[in-house]
Image (cartoon, rainbow, N blue to C red):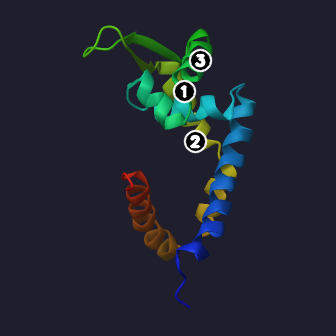
Amino acid sequence: MNPDASDLVEPLARVVRGYYDDLAAVAGRHGLSTTQARALIALDHPLSMSALAEHLVCDASNATGLVARMEARGLVARTPSPEDRRSKTVHATGDGHRLARSLRAEMHTVHGALADLTPTERGALLPLLHRLGELLGRPRD
């Protein structure tokens, strides 16, 4: 069988749902929303507020409130952008980085499913995931 793109959408959606269900459960155990967990994981390097909002697919005011709540917990900090002092850059604090690592490590459902793949299957999957991520990240006409 040679599947076309439409044959792949539902299996991919099942994988994405599994990932987000696992992330939501782990985030909840740490008192975070799924969006806060996604933001914290994305902050493996500093991002502008607008880049974070774009990553989270939300408007800037939502990102500002989300960051304020995480800042109050000591997980992130905002600093003036070195390029434009009027805008802010967000970065994870030491506690934020530790929590982001914990969130990923505690995603036992995802880790278990990936561990159940054979080494050959994991080896085949990794470059395909990288390629798909590149294709999804490029602008469409």
Q: Distance between the residues labelled 3 and 1?
A: 17 Å
Q: Work out whether 67 lies above or below 103.
A: above
> What's the amino acid at mark 3?
Met
Q: Quadrant of residue 91?
A: top left
Answer few, some or many: residues within 10 Å of disc 2's Cα (few below 14, many 20 plus, some between 14 and 19). some
Look at label 2 and name its amino acid: Arg
Which residue bears the numbered disc 3? Answer: 70
For the C terminus, the image quarter is bottom left
Mark 3: which secondary structure?
helix
Q: Residue at x 62, y 32 (%)?
A: 35
Amino acid identity at mark 1: Asp
Side of 71 where 85 appears, left or right: left
Name the residue beneath numbered marker 2: 104
Q: Is residue 33 left or right of residue 129?
A: right
C-alpha separation, residue under disc 3 versus residue under disc 2: 18 Å
Question: Which mark lies nearer to you, 3 or 2?
Answer: 3
Q: Do the residues labelled 3 and 2 touch (CB within 8 Å)?
A: no
Between 82 and 124, the one nearer to me in the picture: 82
Residue 59 pos. (x, y %): 54, 27
Residue 101, compared with residue 140, is above or below; it is: above
